[in-house]
Image: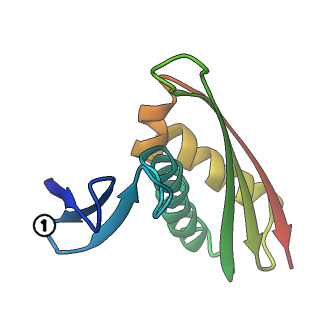
């Protein structure tokens, strides 16, 4: 795996890209997502991909998934995360037990991003089923 990063419109904005040419914009001046926000986006994306695949295998009719992430950081430098909560909103006629199992499987076993982050921060999750 390889990514690169280069300056964007200013010295405080950046464009990161992977080998396939996909780009992500980052900044330190609020013109794009900050690096720490991108970490939260990554854990939400990683776990959502897992949850979708797990629910598909369970034959659960998931129609849509949304994730709201809230985090707390240390006051001291480095300002690493100390707590992260992922709140999943899953749309569809889903069985609660299956949803809970899918979320737990993702965060406890499959999501590489959450497994790395949990070494530094407490990760919790909540969910609601809509529909």
- Seen in the picture, residue 12 relative to 131 is either above or below; the reply is above
Query: Looking at the image, can residue 5 be seen?
Result: yes
* Image quadrant containing the C terminus: bottom right
Please name the residue shown 21% across and 59% down the image. 7
Image quarter of residue 83: top right
Q: Is residue 96 left or right of residue 43?
A: right
| Rendering coords of residue 101 (x, y %) | 67, 51
Tell me the residue that label 1 is attached to.
19
Image quarter of residue 11: bottom left
Please name the residue shown 74% across and 69% down the image. 90
Q: Is residue 89 left or right of residue 10?
A: right
| Rendering coords of residue 21 (x, y %) | 18, 75
Please name the residue shown 61% across and 20% down the image. 75
- SS class, disc 1: loop
Of all residues shown, which one is farthest toward the right? 131
12, 115: nearer the viewer: 12
């Amino acid at each position: 795996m390889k990514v690169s990063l280069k300056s964007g419109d200013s010295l405080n904005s950046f464009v990161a890209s992977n080998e396939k040419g996909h780009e992500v914009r980052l900044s330190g001046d609020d013109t794009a997502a900050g690096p720490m926000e991108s970490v939260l986006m990554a854990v939400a994306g990683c776990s959502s991909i897992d949850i979708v695949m797990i629910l598909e295998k369970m034959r659960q009719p998931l129609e849509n998934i949304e994730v709201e992430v809230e985090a707390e950081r240390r006051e001291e430098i480095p300002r690493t995360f100390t707590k992260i909560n992922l709140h999943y909103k899953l749309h569809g006629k889903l069985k609660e037990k299956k949803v809970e199992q899918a979320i737990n499987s993702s965060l406890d076993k499959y999501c590489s991003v959450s497994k790395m982050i949990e070494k530094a921060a407490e990760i919790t999750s909540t969910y609601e089923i809509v529909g």
